[in-house]
Image (spheres, rainbow, N blue to C red):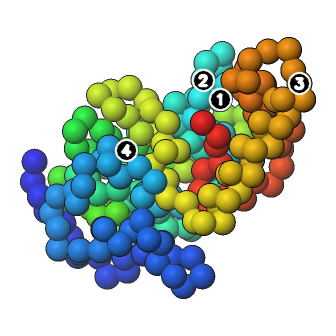
Amino acid sequence: MPARRRKSPGRRRWTRNGTPRAGLIRFSDPGRLAPVIPFQEAKGQLPLPVAGTLLKDFGEEDDFGGVTEGQSIATRPGSNVASPADGWVVYSGPFRSFGQLLILNTGDGYHVLLAGMDRIDVELGQFVLTGEPVGVMGATQWASASTFGLGSTQPILYVEFRKDGSAIDPTPWWVRTEEEKGSRMIRKASLLLVGALMGGCSSHDNVTGADQRLRGSQRGGDGYIPAAQSVR
């Protein structure tokens, strides 16, 4: 596959409070023409392509009797979309009612799909870097199966990870700040406590039931996230 990359003058570094995220230090070489590490080893190091609100997570029930195979993130009109990983562009263009669709081959059978953009700024066969701008969101959302029933008028970016053609949960790959890690630990501790109070079943069942209750109680909230909120 061609290892061609166009120069990007406005490359984003996905910083918070002016401090580069530690997980991106390994991706700092702008001259590379291949993934710096295998995709499988990049867990906990990849930035979200946009900041926004997680409307629907991977594996949740959809409105068609199945479960979601990706994550739907509501963002601001005109937001820049950045590549969450190193990879080669294998598809770039319109796809049905999903708006502009970008598919990246990130190596070893892994692919990243980004759908719902209004414009794509990279070309077929191009090698893109983690954090490099690849497209722009429009003013409104595209009407598609991935946005149906989400109750939002904001533009929505749909993100899907695939391994050998099958959808996988993107959550383990997203980088987290120390604050987010602390919140995750508190959430897990709360689930264990609630599960223990429920009683009458195994600790795993207790935690699963408590997690489902917490997820249900949070549905419909603002839920602004810098990284996907999920407890696995």
Extreme residue in the right direction: 197
**Which type of secondary structure does the marked residue at label 2 adopt?**
loop
Pair 4/3: label in front: 3
Q: Nearer the viewer, residue 224 or 36?
A: 36
Corner quadrant of residue 107: top left
Label 1 element class: loop
- Which residue is the site of mark 4? 112
Determine which of the numbered discs, if any, sits on residue 166 in the image. Answer: none
Q: Relative to 205, say whether 116 is above or below.
A: below
Secondary structure under badge 4?
A: strand
How many C-alpha atoms fall within 10 Å of the one at disc 4: few (<14), some, or many (≥20)?
Answer: many
x, y (%) of residue 56? 66, 40
Of tags 3 and 1, the one toward the viewer is 3
Residue at the disc numbered 1: 60
Q: Position of residue 118 (x, y in %)?
A: 49, 57
Task: Say what amino acid the circle numbered 3 marks.
Answer: Met
Mark 3 Cα-neighbour bin, 10 Å: few <14, some 14–19, many ≥20:
some
The disc labelled 2 sits on which kind of residue? Val
